[in-house]
Amino acid sequence: MRKFILIIVLFFGAAFVYLSFGELQIILQTLRQGNFWFILIALVIQLGWYVIAGLIFRFIYLLLGIDETIYQLSLLVAAANFVNIVTPSAGMGGMAVFISNANRRGYSRGKITIASMLSLLFDYVAFLIVLALAWIVLIRRNDLNASQIAASTIILIIAVSLGFLMWLGSRSAVALGNVLAQMARMVNRIVYPVLHREYLSETRAHQFAHEMAKDLRSLPERPRSLAVPLLYAFANKCLMMLILVSAFLAFQVPFSAGTIIGGFAISYLFLIVSPTPSGIGIVEGVMPLALSSLGVPWSQAVLITLAYRGITFWIPLAIGALALRLLERQRLAVPKTEVKEHSLPD
């Protein structure tokens, strides 16, 4: 059954590439026009992004008493990103990759869910820091508009809500269970006319809340430790901006720090709030407009956007497919192991 699911996921990935083949050809042609060495540097930076992402999860795992290698966690991040893009699962497909690995290695599902939520929270907080800098750039250039303010507000609400759920769970399992049950009830009301049954179990929401609360209570004992993965998350945003810098250099387009910060923040902002996976079709339209408003000629803004998306979206898509296949080989080669409990020094 698991192998069948893998085949289905890879089929969706192949179908996604086929349907986007025209865009992919344009991106490949664009990359060939750029300076080879700067394109290569951008690719190396993208690989470094996976290493930092693995470090974020490793540190969170250690906080929760789980020891896992950076290599394994980087593979999981790559595979999860791939699954989230090619399957309409609202992010749950990527979470399933981590949970599947947890089941095989004997880890707690609650701890893995907490790790994923914390990683997402750190990502939002790190981006909000970059976004604040971008707002300064946009205000100084009189280029801040209503759509950017609305999208920024959505990101802030998501980050605050996620942080609130984590805080609530660390204080009261009952309160978290009530909130999750209410959310499940709302989802069931929305999907019931289509499915004619309950999609989420309110009872399971309470059970899950108690499971999470038990592991969450250990985190406030070392609040300073949470600063380290947050710094890693901010470092990853800096790496993505360096990829954008490499794209500018590859096509010999002049730029300033404000152009890089503003262009990256606007594109990443709409990537998050986009209804399409990883902002496909949205970022490609928004980013040239953002760069153009920041003083980049339109034709060059389009070239930079295509190169940037090729390196940060299409290359990771291929890496994710490979990572998913490697994880499946691991599952077949290595039997289920017992969890290794470790913790960071106080």
Image (cartoon, rainbow, N blue to C red):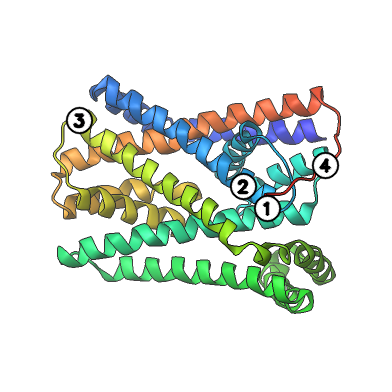
Q: Are marks 2 and 3 in contact (CB under 8 Å)?
A: no
Quadrant into which the N terminus falls = top right
Residue 152 visible here: yes
Q: Are marks 3 and 1 in contact (CB under 8 Å)?
A: no
Residue topped by disc 1: 63
Q: Are marks 1 and 2 in contact (CB under 8 Å)?
A: yes
| Residue 339: numbered disc | 4
Labels 4, 3: front one: 4
Q: Amino acid at mark 2?
A: Phe
Distance from disc 2 to disc 4, alpha carbons, whole Å, reads 16 Å
N-terminal of the pair, mark 2 or mark 3, is 2
Return the residue nearer the eye: 9 or 293.
293
- At label 3, counting other C-alpha atoms closer than 10 Å, the crowd grade (few under 14, some 14-19, many 20 or more) is some
N-terminal of the pair, mark 1 or mark 4, is 1
Position in image of residue 326 (x %, y %): 67, 25
Return the residue nearer the eye: 135 or 217.
217
The answer to whether 181 is drawn above or below residue 32 in the figure is below
The answer to whether 15 is drawn above or below residue 196 in the figure is above
User: What secondary structure is found at the residue carrying circle 3?
Assistant: loop
Distance from disc 1 to disc 2, alpha carbons, whole Å, reads 6 Å
Q: Residue at x 47, y 38 (%)?
A: 49
Residue topped by disc 2: 59
N-terminal of the pair, mark 4 or mark 3, is 3
